[in-house]
Image (cartoon, coloured by chain):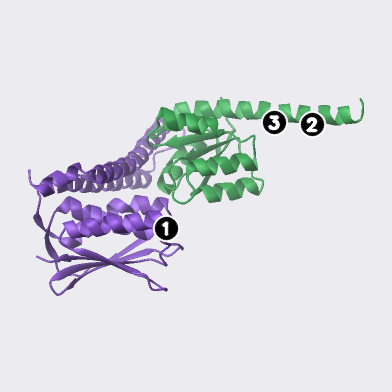
């Protein structure tokens, strides 16, 4: 199956992001990497468009939760999958309440991660289409059409 | 049991033990994740070669195996440090080289400091600095001192830690930036003063503006 998801990998362990991005690119995904939450936020705020962001929870400085909150503030349609060394139910619920799409424990099974990325992209497309439709309805409504 | 052996059951000791072991588990998880991705990539490259899509590059495979070996060495280092820390509660008093104990504590504290965006820089003398001490207690005192420079100091400077021998004492000096007053900072100071006293030493704080210092002094062996 042809894949073309555009993914941003955010993790301070650059060796990890290099390896994972190579494996994803070999499968057709377009991958960018960022070594910090701040770097990820700068990219999104400057207009970079990603189907999915895969985000490490424990990072120095701005951690995964704060990065998640600020990313979604910058773009509410973003689909964010959190990666954590130790996934607990509490962490998972907190992340989902804050707007994360999913939480996976490291080391993540690549085929499982790719499946979640594919589903996330589809949901994002539907979300964006829905917002466009709502905008169109609003414009039509304002003109009395 | 002696009084020092029972110290490991004080609540703050258990909290410290838990925090350090949790930090070590995170470090090990990160290294295992890298090794997992390396193994995955090797598998991908092998499958690609089998299917005739791309020939295996021997120099690439060699570099990858070296990277895996390096990460395994890193995990062994973490496990050795964890083992030394676990055994630090074995005896109430032991002769150790404070250089080794300090360097181990710095590594144990590195993740905590990194999360707060603080770098650690350590200098130690070339000759041994022997002390007779309760090793776990000393780990905790050093960790608390490092913690104080992270939590109770403003700014972006690294924490500079130096170890030296001064007369009959071993002296650990920490500097970072201006101390920020507060209830929690005061509580941390009191805890560290009590712990240093229990170890037969003392801690002093220099609040002078500029680059104030924290000094932990313990009797040398």
Seen at 91% across and 30% down, the residue is A143
Q: Residues within 10 Å of mark 2 (few under 14, many from 20)?
A: few
Q: Which residue occupies the foreground of this view, B193 or B49?
A: B193
Instruction: List x then y, in percent, for residue A108.
Output: 41, 32
- Residue B72 visible in rendering: no
Q: Residues within 10 Å of mark 3 (few under 14, many from 20)?
A: few
The residues bearing labels 2 and 3 have C-alpha atoms spaced at a distance of 11 Å
The residues bearing labels 2 and 1 have C-alpha atoms spaced at a distance of 51 Å
Label ID, residue B129: none
Dot in front, 1 or 3 = 1
Instruction: List x then y, in percent, for residue B63.
Output: 34, 47
Q: Please, what secondary structure does the residue beneath circle 3 have?
A: helix
**Which residue was labeled with disc 1?**
B182
Label the green chain with its letter: A
- The numbered mark, 2 or 3, whose residue comes first in the sequence reads 3
Left or right: A118 as drawn, with respect to B35: right
Q: Do dots 1 and 3 share one subunit?
A: no
Label the purple chain with its letter: B
Q: Which residue occupies the foreground of this view, B100 or B14?
A: B14
Q: Residues within 10 Å of mark 1 (few under 14, many from 20)?
A: few
Q: Please, what secondary structure does the residue beneath circle 1 have?
A: loop
Q: Do dots 2 and 3 share one subunit?
A: yes
Q: Chain of mark 1?
A: B
B108 up-or-down from A80: above or below: below
**Which residue was labeled with disc 2?**
A135
Instruction: List x then y, in percent, for residue A18.
Output: 45, 45
Label ID, residue A128: 3
Left or right: A52 as drawn, with respect to B117: right
Seen at 41% across and 47% down, the residue is A13
Q: Do dots 2 and 1 share one subunit?
A: no
Instruction: Name the quarter where the N terminus of chain A is drawn.
Output: top right
The residue sitting at the right extreme is A144
């Amino acid at each position: 199956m042809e894949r073309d998801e555009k993914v941003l990998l955010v993790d301070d362990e650059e060796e990890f992001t290099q390896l994972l991005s190579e494996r994803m690119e070999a499968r057709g995904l377009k991958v960018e990497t960022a070594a910090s939450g701040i770097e990820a936020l700068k990219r999104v705020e400057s207009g970079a468009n990603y189907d999915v962001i895969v985000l490490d929870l424990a990072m120095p400085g701005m951690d995964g939760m704060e990065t998640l909150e600020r990313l979604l503030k910058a773009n509410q349609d973003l689909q964010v999958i959190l990666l954590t060394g130790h996934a607990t139910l509490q962490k998972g619920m907190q992340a989902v309440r804050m707007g994360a799409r999913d939480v996976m424990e490291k080391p993540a099974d690549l085929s499982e991660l790719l499946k979640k990325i594919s589903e996330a992209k589809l949901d994002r497309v539907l979300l964006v289409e829905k917002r466009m439709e709502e905008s169109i309805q609003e414009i039509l409504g304002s003109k009395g059409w | 049991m002696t009084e020092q052996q029972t110290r490991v059951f004080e609540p703050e000791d258990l909290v410290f033990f838990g925090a350090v072991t949790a930090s070590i588990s995170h470090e090990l998880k990160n290294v295992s994740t890298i090794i997992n991705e390396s193994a995955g990539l090797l598998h991908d490259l092998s499958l690609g070669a089998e299917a005739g899509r791309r020939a295996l590059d021997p120099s690439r495979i060699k570099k990858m195996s070296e990277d895996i070996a390096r990460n395994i060495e890193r995990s062994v280092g973490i496990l050795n440090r964890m083992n030394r820390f676990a055994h630090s509660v074995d005896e109430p008093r032991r002769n150790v080289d404070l250089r080794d104990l300090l360097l181990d504590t710095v590594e144990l504290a590195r993740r905590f400091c990194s999360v707060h965006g603080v770098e650690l820089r350590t200098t130690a003398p070339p000759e041994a600095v022997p002390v007779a001490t309760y090793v776990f207690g000393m780990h905790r005192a050093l960790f608390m001192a490092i913690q104080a420079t992270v939590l109770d100091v403003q700014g972006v400077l690294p924490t500079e830690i130096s170890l030296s021998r001064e007369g009959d004492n071993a002296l650990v000096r920490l500097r970072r930036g201006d101390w920020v007053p507060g209830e929690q900072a005061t509580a941390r100071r009191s805890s560290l003063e009590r712990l240093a006293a229990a170890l037969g030493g003392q801690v002093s704080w220099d609040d002078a503006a500029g680059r104030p210092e924290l000094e932990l002094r313990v009797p040398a062996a």
